[in-house]
Image (tube, rainbow, N blue to C red):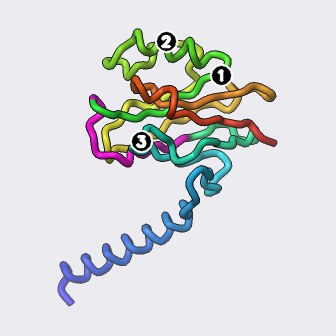
């Protein structure tokens, strides 16, 4: 076997092994259910039709940080139908959205420096993905939190609840 053939064979085996490991770490999940691969992270899709794949994300207070992985499953560029993931206290959500609309598209409709925004990904075009990590210490027991997409016309229908547990 030539060195090139052996390298391709080894690389193919490694790629298959990595894919199998990823499949185990990120099991398929029904719509509306947060994956349980880790209590300190969640994956969510921004889908065509102005919706997220999950309407609730549960965060363990045992986590020091929490990471949200967002994938935009559509095909349009962000200027036409972008998706992002923005988290704020539910009590602040209308004011955060209003401030974001004033910030405009250059800021992905999220006001720069708005302390009410706990976490936000950048605005994504179809096929893109991004992650955001935030300290769980920013979440308080008994408080309600809403995540949403800040693209105009998406903010109302494209929402979910983030819940602090245990």
Q: CA distance from mark 1 to mark 3?
A: 25 Å
Residue furthest to the bottom: 1
Is 58 left or right of 88, judged from the image as shown? right
Do the residues bearing badges 2 and 3 touch, measured as CB atoms within 8 Å?
no
Is 45 left or right of 161, judged from the image as shown? left
* Residue at (77, 40) in percent of width and height: 165
- Mark 1 or mark 3: name the one nearer the start of the chain: 3
* Residue at (41, 26) in percent of width and height: 153
Query: Of tags 2 and 3, which is closer to the observer?
Result: 3
On the rendered image, what quadrant is the C terminus found in? Answer: top right
* Residue at (54, 60) in percent of width and height: 26
The residue segment tinted magenta is 68-79
Element class at badge 3: loop
Residue designated by label 1: 89
Question: x, y percentage for residue 50?
Answer: 44, 38
**14 within the magenta span:** no
Residue designated by label 2: 98
Element class at badge 1: strand
- Mark 2 or mark 1: name the one nearer the start of the chain: 1
Q: Nearer the viewer, residue 16 or 8?
A: 16
Q: Nearer the viewer, residue 117 or 54?
A: 54
Element class at badge 2: helix
On the rendered image, what quadrant is the N terminus found in? Answer: bottom left
Q: Which mark is residue 74?
A: none
Is 52 left or right of 89, judged from the image as shown? left
Residue designated by label 3: 49
């Amino acid at each position: 076997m030539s060195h090139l053939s052996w390298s391709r064979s080894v690389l193919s085996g490694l790629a298959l092994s990595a894919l199998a490991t990823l499949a185990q770490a990120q099991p398929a999940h029904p719509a509306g259910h947060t994956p349980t691969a880790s209590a300190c992270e969640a994956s969510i899709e921004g889908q065509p039709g102005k919706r997220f794949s999950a309407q609730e994300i549960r965060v363990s207070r045992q986590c020091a940080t929490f990471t949200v992985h967002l994938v935009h499953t559509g095909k349009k560029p962000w200027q036409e139908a972008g998706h992002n993931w923005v988290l704020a206290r539910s009590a602040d959500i209308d004011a955060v959205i209003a401030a974001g609309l004033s910030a405009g598209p250059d800021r992905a409709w999220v006001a720069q420096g708005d302390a009410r925004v706990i976490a936000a990904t950048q605005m994504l075009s179809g096929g893109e993905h991004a992650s955001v990590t935030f300290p769980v210490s920013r979440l308080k027991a008994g408080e309600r939190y809403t995540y949403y997409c800040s693209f105009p016309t998406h903010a109302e229908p494209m929402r979910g609840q983030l819940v602090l547990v245990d």
